[in-house]
Amino acid sequence: MCGIVGWLNVDLSADAAERTLQRMCSSIEYRGPDDDGMFFDQSVGLGMRRLSIVDVAGGHQPISSDDGALQLVFNGEIYNHDELRRRLASRGAQFKTRSDTEVILRTYEFEGLNGFKSFNGMFAIALWDGRSRTLHLVRDRLGVKPLYYAVDGKKVVFASEVKAILASQLVDREVNTRALWDFITCRYVPAPETIWLKVFKLKPGHWLSLKHGESASEPRRWWDVPTDSVSCCDKDEEAVDQFTSLFENAVDLRMVADVPVGILLSGGLDSSAVAAAAARKGARVETFSVAFEGAAEIDERGYARSVAAHLGTKHHEVVIGSREFIEFLPRLTHLTDEPLADLASVPLFYVNKLARQSVKVVLSGEGSDEIFGGYTFDRWVAQWDSARERRWGAHGGPLRSWSGRALRAFSRTRIDPVVETDLRRLSEPLVMTNLASTAEKERWFRQPVVAPDSLQRVRDDLSRIGEQDPLNQALYVYCQDWLVEDLLMKADRMSMANSVELRTPFLDYRLVEWAWRLAPRLKVGRDAAGRYATKLILRKYAQGRLPGSVIDRPKMGFPVPVYGWLSNQLSGWASDVLGGDARVRTWFRDEAINELLTEGIDPEASTQARHRLWNLLVLEHWMQSWKA
């Protein structure tokens, strides 16, 4: 694990190149405090900061081919690197280290970029091929590891974090109005845009090949979920067996390291299942939880303690309050580079800080809800099933016709008015966050914004996968956007800020592809008692492995009491942050900010109103932190 930086088509003297790479690497030193390295030659530069996890002694980067023509820096882990090393060795590859970095290099030598499709892992790769004078940037399938790039003519600058690109001083700082427009709706900036006009995200499952001396091309998608209708299994028992094998192997692979490994344990089903799989072989596992003081109604420590006692883990806890929360906000907006109004970022930082005292790697439950149907999909699937029965009879009718109509309804295509009304209502879960409409934003912004509707990207994603079961449609959309730009971005930043590597077993690509082919009723469907339940396959796995109270408890996410604080001890603070000299007032009308503030601190405020206020508070802190 590390942070990577570099450029192409930038002409600097040797001294200037070294200073620039050092400046970029220093800005993200926390991502890799154990080692650093750099390569520059003419108009190419590569740099890295390393957090040593595998082959601590031999995994230095950049790593080069024997003739020096290939240079590679890499952020992440290739979990199946031992298997790939054996395969390549049988073909004559010679290895000098045990590192997964060298496996990437040798794979490219023998198989080119297509060989990267055999990688099981999380990765952001930059590879300079001096033979073809091409820089390849590659991001993993699900976007667990970030990769950004800036384009200015033929000049390209890239890094694991935007701040490193800005530290190069090779890219102008100009706020991207479209990103602000989308942030107000989404609470994050959707890809490929970033908050800075000339900086972009390389989207998950894409690579970008840049030729020396030529203008940047468009990124190409190299992976997507399989959208065919082939079923992974016919019987429930067979499905549970297959899930068990894939899931436990995914956990086993992510427990392998040359440093201590622990589990972030919230006490929810997802992290508890990860802990159960990790502890099943009798190894002494360390688990870590966080809670807020004075917030007993959302305190999950009792569940976490129950799981820890059941599994025999060595359990650790940290408790934070409103003071720690508020004092951390300026650092939060610096760490995230872009505004990210996810309240759970703060407790996630503190639990990773706690973990770093004992381990260097943690496993977490991110991705389970988006792969297997969590959140409130039990309610939505029940409504979908009911609507199908009303329209087409007790057997559900033509499912593909239903999903096709749902897609057209969401895309605002005119269909039968009665059906359209029903389907528009039932298509709500296709969007995780929709905090402001185009009409509302047009009223709030000081100047007109030329940008598409912020939900257009969702319609584009739906069009790409075509007609599917509505649950699969929704989960696909979540994986393209919400999972990457909120959950995984937050997980990467809050763990790496503490020099901790966070691994996500549920996002093992084999498990993801298998889940896509799993019958929707085994994701969200009726349990043995006839009640609709989310993540049904995971609950079946958990039977006998976890306490019943954990299996059957409702999902709480990563609960944070801040919204209640906004109407009490933080109301004055919120008013001060958004006062007359607030930077956000250069972008938004005074009356809009005052209205959102008044609505958000009202003790009877809706969740929507408090979401909107928190968006503004985070945006103001971001603007102050980055002087935007």
Image (cartoon, rainbow, N blue to C red):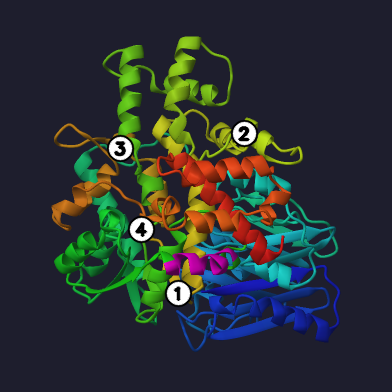
Q: Residue flagged by tag 3: what amino acid is it?
A: Val
Residue named by callout 2: 440
Q: Residue at x 50, y 11 (%)?
A: 417
How packed is label 2: few (under 14 Cα within 10 Å), some, or many (20 or more)? Answer: few
Q: Earlier in the sequence, mark 4 or mark 1?
A: 4
Q: Residue at x 35, y 31 (%)?
A: 380
Q: Position of residue 388 (x, y in %)?
A: 34, 19
Q: Position of residue 107 (x, y in %)?
A: 57, 68
How packed is label 3: few (under 14 Cα within 10 Å), some, or many (20 or more)? Answer: many
Q: Earlier in the sequence, mark 2 or mark 3?
A: 2
Q: Is residue 333 above or below residue 284?
A: above
Q: Earlier in the sequence, mark 2 or mark 4?
A: 4
Please identify, in this view, whether the residue under mark 2 or under mark 3 is nearer the observer. Answer: 2
Mark 1 residue element: loop
Q: Residue at x 14, y 35 (%)?
A: 529
Q: Residue flagged by tag 4: what amino acid is it?
A: Gly
The answer for how far apart the CA atoms under marks 2 and 1 are is: 40 Å
Q: Is residue 584 magenta?
A: no
Residue named by callout 1: 500
Quadrant including the C terminus: bottom right
Q: Please name the predominant secondary structure of the magenta segment in the image.
A: helix
Q: Residue flagged by tag 2: what amino acid is it?
A: Glu
Q: Quadrant of residue 229?
A: top left
Residue named by callout 3: 524
The answer for how far apart the CA atoms under marks 2 and 3 are is: 34 Å
Residue named by callout 4: 365
Q: Residue flagged by tag 1: what amino acid is it?
A: Val
How many numbered circles does the render carry? 4
